[in-house]
Amino acid sequence: MKAWLPALVRLAVLALLVVFITSPGWFEPLLKPLTENGAPAIYNQGSLLTLTLQHLRTVLIATVAATIVAVALAILVTRPAGAEFLPLSRSLVNIGQTFPPVAVLALAVPAVGFGEKPTLIALFLYGLLPIFENALTGLTTISPEIEESARGTGMTEGQRLLQIELPLALPLILAGIRLSVAVAIGTATIGSTVGASTLGEAIIAGLINSNLAFVAQGGLVVGVLAILAYDGLRTIERQIAKRTGAIAH
């Protein structure tokens, strides 16, 4: 019975989140104490459901792009022909960590305009480092005996990469993606400052109007989304790690 408890808790939290973003009016009595001077308790400048879906869409696009680029770079620098590009690759993926997302937005807006694009650029750059470093670690810590056995069976370099190296490195790669997604969900809120449709709209509206109920709604949904995504990806990561005999972090 205890083994089912975490799954039940996740489902309960997810169900509560779905109810909250689809029918926020049901929670008005809980949020009303956070308002002043008769201000509305429920965010009324848009749909929480729509903002949540657009928020997740932005995070998904940025994470998929960051994963493709980061894993491709890790594969490149772990091949003999690309080993010399490791320092350059590390410099490139560190760009997102060098500049805070707000600074990236400020630099991106003049180039690509307002809206979702500068937010995608910021999240993409910010998500590269954890995925790249984890992929690099996963690809460079495979047992030499396994590599030698694969060569002994006549597998080509491409076959070893696809059938041996990437599957064994997958738990670590997923760990990097997990960190990237959790950070991106929280960071995406600042995209609303440059016109992107994210849950940051509710938070910003609350700050402008001194309405803590709006801030709480946006912040609560973002926080729960980040926790659920982090926990869900960690569960997947552990299942894959068990199958490959790796250690999930």
Image (spheres, helix red, strand yellow):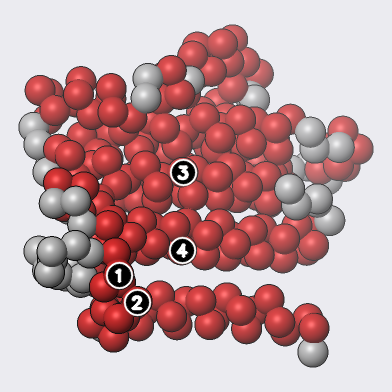
Q: Are marks 1 and 2 in contact (CB under 8 Å)?
A: yes
Q: Are marks 4 and 3 in contact (CB under 8 Å)?
A: no
Q: Badge 1, how many Cα within 10 Å: few under 14, some, many 20+?
A: few
Q: Are marks 2 and 3 in contact (CB under 8 Å)?
A: no
- Tag 2: amino acid: Leu
Q: Nearer the viewer, mark 1 or mark 2?
A: 1
Number of callouts in the render? 4
Q: Nearer the viewer, mark 4 or mark 3?
A: 4
- Where does the N terminus fall, quadrant-wise? bottom right
Q: Which residue has dot 2 on it? A: 30
Q: Which residue has dot 4 on it? A: 224
- Mark closer to the chain start, 4 or 1: 1
Q: Badge 2, how many Cα within 10 Å: few under 14, some, many 20+?
A: few
In percent of width and height, residue 3 lies at 78, 81
Q: Which mark is residue 33?
A: 1
- Tag 4: amino acid: Val
* Corner quadrant of residue 148: top right
The CA span between labels 4 and 3 is 13 Å
Q: Nearer the viewer, mark 4 or mark 2?
A: 2
The CA span between labels 4 and 1 is 21 Å
In percent of width and height, residue 52 lies at 28, 64
Q: Which residue has dot 3 on it? A: 183
- The residue lying furthest to the front in this view is 37
